[in-house]
């Protein structure tokens, strides 16, 4: 079996992932006007603790975090749907309802 070259790996990754969907925290705070950095930090920590949302956070360094925008929106909709519920709705159920 022939191993792919670095160029082939990069091209495959770019074809699979839309890099425009990934934001640094500062850029996400600009989209969500009024959200504080501490609130976003808390959301990121919560996303990392939930398997369905953990793939939406990439932390390649101690001060670098990338957030997948569609997954973040899904997370916010999940939080909203579970706001006052004792028995939480699973993330995949919220995703089905959202479309």
Image (spheres, rainbow, N blue to C red):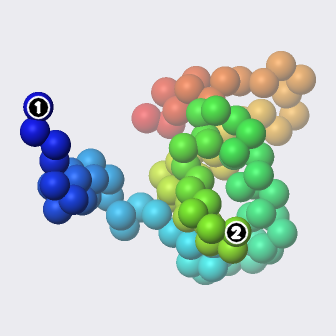
Residue 4: give x, y in percent of width and height.
16, 47
Residue 59: give x, y in percent of width and height.
61, 60
Residue under the image location 55 percent in, 49 percent down = 56
Rounded to the nearest whole Å, what is the CA distance between mark 1 and mark 2?
37 Å
Residue beneath disc 1:
1
Residue beneath disc 2:
62
Residue under the image location 41 percent in, 61 percent down = 21
Q: Above or below — where is 1 with respect to 57?
A: above
Helix, strand or loop at mark 2: loop
Residue 63 falls in image quadrant: bottom right
- Foreground pick, 88 / 24: 24
Q: Quadrant of the C terminus?
A: top left
Residue 75 falls in image quadrant: top right
Q: Is residue 90 left or right of residue 86?
A: left
CB under 8 Å between discs 1 and 2 = no
Q: Is residue 97 left or right of residue 64?
A: left
Q: Residue 32, can we see it?
A: no
Give the residue furthest to the top.
87
Q: Between tags 1 and 2, which lies in front?
A: 1
Residue under the image location 51 percent in, 58 percent down = 69
| Residue count near mark 1 (Cα–Cα under 10 Å), binned few <14, some 14–19, many ≥20 | few
Residue under the image location 27 percent in, 53 percent down = 13
Q: Above or below — where is 28 with respect to 83?
A: below
Q: Earlier in the sequence, mark 1 or mark 2?
A: 1
């Amino acid at each position: 079996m022939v191993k792919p070259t670095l160029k082939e790996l990069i091209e495959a990754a770019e074809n699979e992932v839309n890099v425009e969907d990934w934001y640094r925290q500062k850029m996400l705070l600009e989209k969500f006007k009024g959200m504080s950095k501490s609130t976003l930090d808390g959301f990121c920590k919560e996303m990392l603790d939930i398997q369905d949302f953990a793939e939406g956070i990439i932390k390649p360094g101690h001060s670098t975090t990338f957030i997948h925008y569609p997954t973040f929106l899904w997370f916010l909709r999940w939080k909203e749907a579970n706001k006052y519920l004792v028995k939480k709705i699973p993330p995949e159920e919220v995703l089905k309802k959202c479309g």
